[in-house]
Amino acid sequence: MNRIMTLILVLLAFSACSKGEKNIESPVGYDFSKPVKYVMPAELAEISGIAFAPGSQELMYAIEDEDGQLFYWKNGHPKPVTAVDFGKHGDYEDLGITKKYVTILRSDGILFNFPLQEAKGAAISTVKEWESLIPEGEYEGLYADDATDDLYILCKNCGADRKTGAVSGYILHLDEEGRPALTGNFKINTEAIQTLKPKKKNGFRPSALSFNKKTQEWYILSSVNKSLVVTDKNWQPKQVVALDPALFPQPEGITFDIDNNLYISNEAGSTASGTVLKFVFRQPAR
């Protein structure tokens, strides 16, 4: 009888542990259960976008969504950080860096850019402002392709997308002087996303995007419903990864380094500090 009771207790304990374990979803090549976590200093509690300069991962650049400041620090060592003023108080949502320019997206779709080499000292005096390039709406996601000098911008909430079953995106090209011009557009089928993850009911509201050059896939964050959407290079959804709110309280920034490691930044939200999470790339087994 004692042996039977012991076996029952062991099985119950194992069952309880199994129920308590979380099923951590991850995109192919990454393990979201094993992040390297960097806690941001107080000035980056509202970190809203991250990026690396082309061909380098020595410095990580970031913005936050209240003050017109560009931040940078030695990758992996977020204290101390250097802050450079580029603009007035505003809702800045994302940034992209090409070989020569830093471009910053404000939530109303207005862009600001300046030469990367001037991102030093206390303030930047050569900032240019570009408006009326894309339709009115709310925007949070910007990606800069350093090979082509193209900018990809995604709507978060745009009137033109209502009742269309899609989210609109726009492509702009930077000329040698850093002047952006609209060259194209694209759409992401939200109904296809819903098919992949039917339980996600809060809609698709992109908060950041980046391109995985190794897999030729787009990685798109939707902070509103805690999701990472992976599409092919033509924007066709392939996977929807549910993000654990305990690890991703408010995911607002995403980028890859030159070794294809993935970084996702979180605003503090209801937590104590903003964070940057690093996920090491592992070549999938064939």
Image (tube, grey):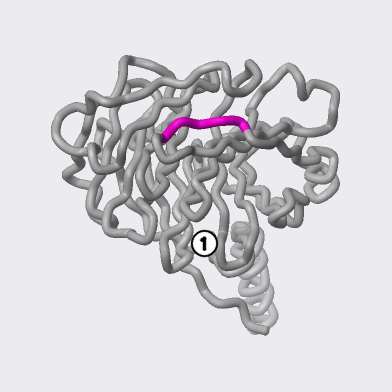
Q: How many marks?
A: 1
Residue 33 at x, y percent in the picture: 52, 61
Location of residue 35 with respect to 136 vertically, above or below: below
Q: Which residues are magenta?
A: 178-182
Quadrant showing the C terminus? bottom right
Q: Nearer the viewer, residue 171 or 160?
A: 171
Residue 148 at x, y percent in the picture: 53, 51
Q: Residue drawn 43% across and 68% down?
A: 259
Residue 212 appears in which quarter of the rendering? bottom right
Visible residue check, residue 88: yes
Q: Main secondary structure of the magenta part?
A: strand
Q: Nearer the viewer, residue 162 or 181?
A: 181
Q: Residue drawn 47% across and 21% down?
A: 130
| Residue 16 relative to residue 262: left or right | right
Q: Residues within 10 Å of mark 1 (few under 14, many from 20)?
A: some
Q: Nearer the viewer, residue 200 or 99?
A: 99
Tell which residue pokes out farthest to the left in this image: 121
Residue 169 at x, y percent in the picture: 67, 34
Q: Residue drawn 64% across and 58% down?
A: 217
> Disc 1 residue type?
Ser
